Amino acid sequence: MAAAASIVMPKRKPLPAGLPREWYENHNRRLKAMRLAISLLDTGTYDAKRATNRKIRTMAVRVGIHRPSNLTCRMVRAFIVANAG
């Protein structure tokens, strides 16, 4: 039997200091939307029209992410559209 491969996560770099609060909020929102878009793509949701707010929020619960806002849901759909092109 093959041994299970262990995944080592890369060390995170600290975020740059001194930027406006909106930059940090937007940065974290993009990261959250990207994680949700990847999860949806992995489960077979390749069309942005099928990625409803309800489906995105259900995926957030399954993945263990806080409930996304309407803006984050729009970003998720934008990432899915960008992936299709």
Image: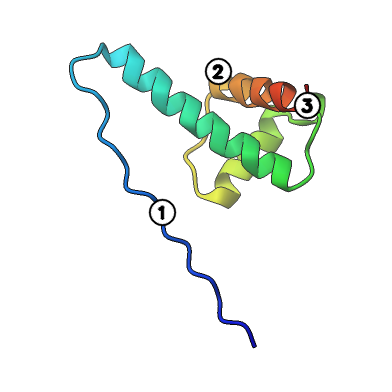
Q: Position of residue 43 (x, y in %)?
A: 74, 48
The residue identified by callout 2 is: 71
Q: Amino acid at mark 1?
A: Met
Write the residue at 49% across / 43% down. Answer: 65
Q: Residue furthest front?
A: 2
Count of numbered circles on the image? 3
Name the image quarter holding residue 21: top left
Mark 2 to mark 1 CA distance (whole Å): 29 Å
- Residue 4 versus residue 28: which sits nearer the camera? 4
Q: Which quarter of the figure has residue 51?
A: top right
Residue 11 seen:
yes
Residue occupying image coordinates x 53% and y 24%: 69
- The first of marks 2 and 1 along the sequence is 1
Q: Look at label 2 and name its amino acid.
A: Leu
Q: Secondary structure at mark 2?
A: helix
Residue at horizontal 56 percent and vertical 32 percent from the top: 34
Q: Is 62 placed left or right of 80 in the picture?
A: left
Location of residue 23 in the rendering, given as x and y in whole percent from the top left corner: 34, 15
Which residue sits furthest left? 18
For the point 32% across and 42% down, which residue is it?
A: 12
Q: Could you tell me residue 30's position as x and y percent?
A: 49, 25
- Above or below, 79 against 40 in this view is above
Report the residue marked by disc 1: 9
Which of the two discs, 3 and 1, labels the residue nearer the N terminus? Answer: 1
N-term mark: 3 or 2:
2
Which residue carries the number 3 mark?
84
Which of the pair 43/18 is nearer the observer?
18
Q: Secondary structure at mark 3?
A: helix
